Amino acid sequence: MANLKENNRDQWSSKLGFVLAAAGSAVGLGNLWRFPYTAGQNGGGAFVLVYFGILLLVGFTLMLAELLIGRHTQLNAVGAYRKIRKNWGWVGGIGVLASFLILSFYSVIGGWVINYLFKAATGAFTVPGTDMADLFVSFITNPGQPIIYHGIFAFLTLAIVMGGISGGIEKYSKILMPGLFVMMIVIMLRSVTLPGASEGIRFFLMPDFSKITGEVMLAALGQVFFSLSLGMGVIITYGSYLSKDENIPQSAMIIPLVDTGVALLAGLAILPAVFALGFSPDQGPALLFIILPAVFANMPLGTFFGVIFFLLVLFAALTSSISLLEASVSYIVDEFNWNRKKTALLLGLAVFLLGIPSSLAQGVWSHIEPFRELDILDSIDFVASNIMLPLSGFLLCIFIGWIWGIDEALKEATNKGKISFKLAGFWSFLIKWVAPIAILVVFFQGLK
Ligand code: PFF
């Protein structure tokens, strides 16, 4: 994203640069941490099946929609809506607010990753007789330590955003993202070959249709939005840095494919091991941190693999968290003309403060359940991911399909007729009818 164009807006330096950054935003803790445990809590294969359905009908459709609006207007999410229709800015606002809430707990989990990187490096997983559940619980319930690590993660995020996303990230992504992919394959192979793993493979891949409930569908809907970074204005913002001759429909296909590939690998790395090692799949946010160290303990060169793995997870988490922070920073910089560095610093600090209750919720504040018997972290996640994001996605469909108009959208998608977009008719039908109706139905079924 190094070239400044005539209107002084950064642009991606290459097509690969953009795809990597967008994939970097999509691939993160959502795939590695959230997808496996949400699948584990929601019936395994049943969840995965519904996830795929929603991905095909809603995920691809909205990915393209957000990129289009972003590139068309060359603005942040709020400004983008407003430029097209004066009184629609608030829809972008819902997304920006959601991205901020999500970043607050995302940074807490990012802090856990940093701590686990140190644990891996000091050989903590390979000490014989270590109880991985104890190791994890004693860390996250501590009132002080996890907050320090959360602060480190928030600081890293804001430092990168302050420096501008340019140079570094694009360059490192080229090496580290494929590295993560290879690493996940290695871990997955170890996991599926553990004695007793087949029950977990079945759990993850064979849908039990009786388990498909409204709640499972809502969880899958929220996961699609979370994982693809949709509904938050992030993809709109990234689209705004795209050049006018980019083939957007093509990019809108590649990003969800890569993202889903990583999520499936993570599921296959974690869930078979859950069964093989005698754990239960529904333990929520702890899953990744308990299961994978146990897998490393069962692997030759476990310490080595553990360090590389948590390093790659940290990188994946940072490429996502910077995009989350970037959504609100670009909003404030564009709309209020604030200085970029100061904005990043202030918002980063606010994220840190807002994340503290989520961190304490693992221990001293675990009795506080603001919503549906969920602790503070899970409540914020539920409200942001399962309510605000689908709502913002639904409004996006209405906006494109019925307010801005399909013709305008298609002009942008085809670069005014210069490139062919074979699925134009199908996409139009999806964004006008199928996606908004699917979101509404799932939303109300799930909240009942
Ligand atoms: N998609 C990221 C993940 O799966 O970890 C998280 C995320 C990043 C969500 C950026 C939303 C977003 F705007």
Image (cartoon, rainbow, N blue to C red):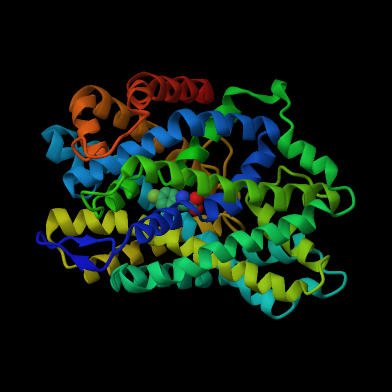
Q: Nearer the viewer, residue 390 or 195?
A: 195
Give how far across and how far down residue 291 sits, in percent. 74, 57
Evaluate whether residue 417 shows in this view: yes
Residue 43 seen by the camera: no
Q: Position of residue 385 (x, y in %)?
A: 46, 40
Which quarter of the picture shows residue 214?
Answer: top right
| Left or right for 125, reference 405 | right
Image coordinates of residue 125 in percent, x first then y, are 76, 71
- For the point 70% across and 71% down, which residue is it? 305
Q: How many marks?
A: 0
Observer-nearest of 426 and 379: 426
User: Residue 52's x, y, as percent?
Assistant: 56, 33
Residue plotted at (51% across, 72% down): 148
**Residue at (87% x, 73% y) in the render:** 128
253 up-or-down from 213: above or below? below
Residue at (42% x, 55% y) in the render = 25
Q: Is residue 191 above or below residue 165?
A: above
